[in-house]
Structure formats: structure tokens, C-alpha cells
Image (cartoon, helix red, strand yellow):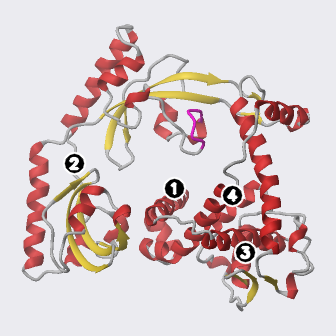
Amino acid sequence: MLNKSILVFSIFCLFIISLKAQEKVIIDQVVAVVGKQVILQSDIESQAMQLRSQGYYTSGDLKCEIFEEMLYSKLLVNQAILDSVQVSDSEIASEMERRLNYFINQIGSEEKLEEFYDKSIPEIKEEFKEVIKDQLLSQRMQQEAASDISVTPQEVKAYYKSMPEDSLPMINTEFEIEQIIVNPKTEEVEILRLKDELREFKKRIENGESFAVLAGLYSEDPGSRVKGGELGFVSRGDLVSEFSAVAFNLKVGEISKIVKTDYGYHIIQLVEKKGERINCKHILLKPKVSSHEMLKAKHRLDSVRTLLINKELTFKEACWKFSEDEETRLNGGVMVNPQTGNSRWEASHLEPKVAYAIKNLEVGQISSPFESEDMNGTKVYKIVTIKSKSEPHSANLKDDYQRIQDLALGKKRAEFMEEWVAKKVKNTYVKIDDDFNNCTFKNNIWKNL
């Protein structure tokens, strides 16, 4: 199998649609069949092109490495379908957004991403929906196959002792951070303004103007605005509950009343309904927060910070009493790293504004209030404190048991999956094109198939 860094990168490479500097025509053909799954020559050529463009080097045959990883992935997808393993539309949509956000952050903006790929965001989403579905099925199948694999403390210790000293992973400085968030209040006059504007849009549409044109001009949902507000076919699970409750009860062509969600205020028009899936358009307007309310939120946090500095409250007590972030309020404000699932953060993984706020803090010190954004892009104010900070060091059982346990578990699961794949290959139709018979595979099960 490809090493971890290549696996991660190859997932992102599937998003590359074209490299203008390396345009070339690829004559396509099926180079492998795994059950009912196929691998195309173009799939391999495309990934190889992207890896080379990023300066990746391997001492082996790059196309053979990619091909072997694809064989493994297709086997998992084929078995997932046989075992009725499923991923939901909402999971696919969430993963799509995560990857798009990664590329948008890398390239600078949605507009630059669309310009580079010569496709709109909705077109990119549509093109790679099946790709992401297969990747999630592959991951889900692997998780289910190895779900019963675990490691005992004795196995963790044995794994640690078996590692050469110069192979122990280096642990960078890591922080545990707690936060208190205050949401600036939206003034009633601003909400009334938005509602009046949406009512006016609805009236104009009912009088013959185009919903799509108005959405393109005024909607504040960048993902759907470029398609005239159209979301494409979605299920209930793809939408927030307030939105879906209204949208699924509309008649085709009907325009909804004003709907409030965490994202803002909407009007919705049903385009088409197929069973439990609908296609609809919407116009989203987000309320603007006045500078006066922003200042009030900052002053409120200044007061909370004073209470903390004077030790009139613990951070946990202040968080429970004053924080308006439901994600962290009840756990003392502890920020959980979504990449690892634990509370440890390297500075490079933090939101830039948080990283800057803790730059000169010592453990236990509290930052000044600073402006940030929540997951919906809404402006908030927050204060943070460093709960703990580790120095760079080689991994050891005392400080990094969880990390070493994860490594030991990963190794044991990898060994299990190698045996699992060998068994499944025997009972799965696999046909490999002669052009790849000379590949030196890392797993010999792909030989002579």
C-alpha cells in the first residue's frame, strides 16, 4: 500500500480537474476490474500527473504504486456494496465541503478556485460526488472490517519497546486551549430590514421576475448563488432541520415564507421532488452586526476576563456562566481538534487568530478579547487561555501514551487488513491488464491475477 502521506495526498489529487500547464489527451481504457468496479487508465495518468506536478518523487514506479492503491480501494468498495455498507448524502456533502474549503484556503478564494479549474463550485461538486462516495465507502468498509481489533496495554508497551530509538516520532509543541465565546447581538431593526427585503423578493418573483436572477444578485450563499440559488437534489439529512421542514412541504413552484436558520434568513422555492429527495432554490440573507453590538460583546468579555484575573471565578465556571458556544460551553471551553479527536493542538493547526492570541501567553494566562468567526461564518468575540503546553520531545509512554496506542493499533489493523484483503481477493473476480503484470507490488496478492 502507499505510505500515509501519499494516501492523504492522493485523496486530494482526485479533486484536480485539469492542469493548464500539463494539458494532454489520455486515451482511455479499462486496466483492471475488481468485482463490479473498474479502474481506468485515465485515473492513473491523472493522479500521476498531479503528483509529479507537486514534486513528488519515488524510487519505485509511480503508476504501479497508484495502481496498487486503487486495486485495494476498489476491493473495499466492491465488498462494501456486497455487505450493504452505506454512506449518507449528508456525509458526502460534508466531506465535499471539507475538501473544497481546503483547496479554497490553499488557492485564496472561491473565485480563484473556479478560475483555475474553469468550473463553477456546483460543477466541481457534481463531478466529484461519486468519487467521494467511493472513498467514504472504502473507509467505512475498512473501519467495519477492523472494528473488533484492539490493543492491550501490554501490546502498546511491547510496540513501544520494539521501536528503535531513532524511529520514535517527534512530538512538536502542543497546546490544550479553553475558550469563552460571546455572540454579538443582531439588532431588531436589522432583522426587520432583512425580512422586508425577502418579502419584496418574493413579491417580485410572484409578479414574474426570475428567482434565479434575484438569487444570483442578492443571495449570500456563495455555493448556490452561482447556480441561481439552486441546491440540486438533496435529502432531509443534507439540510438543517428548520430549512428541510419547510422545503419538503412546499408544492412545485411554490415559494416559502421566511425561514430562519443558524445561517440567516431564507426564502425557498421547490423546483422538483423525487421520492424523499428534492431540488430547490433559495435566497439567503445574513444579518449584519453593528459596530455598537460588536463593541458591547468585547466589553462583556473584558469584564469576564477581569473576573478571571481576579480569581473570582475559575475558567470552567466562567465558561458555563457566560459562554454562548454550545460546542464547548459544557466542557469547560476545551477546544477539540477535529483532525485528531482530542484536545491537543499544534500551533499550525489552529485558526490563525487563535494562534496569534496565544503567541505570547504562558500557561494559565488569559488573552484579551479578539474577533473571530464561528462555523457558520458569523462574527463572534472570544477569549482563550492555555490549559497546558508541551515542549518538543521524542514520544514516550508517560506523556504520549494515546499517540503510541494509536500507532500500535494502526499497525495491528494494517496487518489484519492485509489478511482480510488476501481472503477477499480469492473470492472476488479480479482482472488486471497485461501492461501492469510487471509491477512490483508491495502485496503479492495482486500478482498473477
Q: The disc labelled 4 sits on which kind of residue?
A: Ala
Q: The disc labelled 1 sits on which kind of residue?
A: Asn
Q: Which mark is residue 145?
A: 4
Q: Which residues are magenta?
A: 340-346
Could you tell me residue 58's position as x and y percent?
Answer: 85, 63
Q: CA distance from mark 4 to mark 3?
A: 32 Å
Residue in view at x 35 percent, y 19 percent: 318
Image side of residue 369 versus residue 355, left or right: left
Q: CA distance from mark 4 to mark 1?
A: 34 Å
Name which of mark 2 and mark 4 comes first in the sequence: 4
Near mark 1 (Cα within 10 A), the count class, few <14, some 14-19 or many ≥20, is: few
In this rendering, the answer to whether 415 lies above or below 340 is below
Residue 167 sits in quarter: top right
Name which of mark 2 and mark 3 comes first in the sequence: 3
Image side of residue 441 versus residue 151, left or right: right
In terms of secondary structure, where does tag 1 sit? helix
Q: The disc labelled 3 sits on which kind of residue?
A: Met
Q: Quadrant of the N terminus?
A: bottom right
In this rendering, the answer to whether 355 lies above or below 303 is below
Residue 314 sits in quarter: top left
Q: CA distance from mark 1 to mark 3?
A: 22 Å
Q: Residue beneath label 1, please?
A: 105
Name which of mark 4 and mark 3 comes first in the sequence: 3
In terms of secondary structure, where does tag 3 sit? helix
Q: CA distance from mark 2 to mark 3?
A: 45 Å
Is 131 in the magenta? Answer: no
Q: Which of these two is toward me, 217 or 32?
A: 32
Near mark 4 (Cα within 10 A), the count class, few <14, some 14-19 or many ≥20, is: some
Q: Residue beneath label 2, please?
A: 288
Residue in view at x 87 percent, y 70 percent: 445
Could you tell me residue 187's position as x and y percent?
Answer: 14, 42
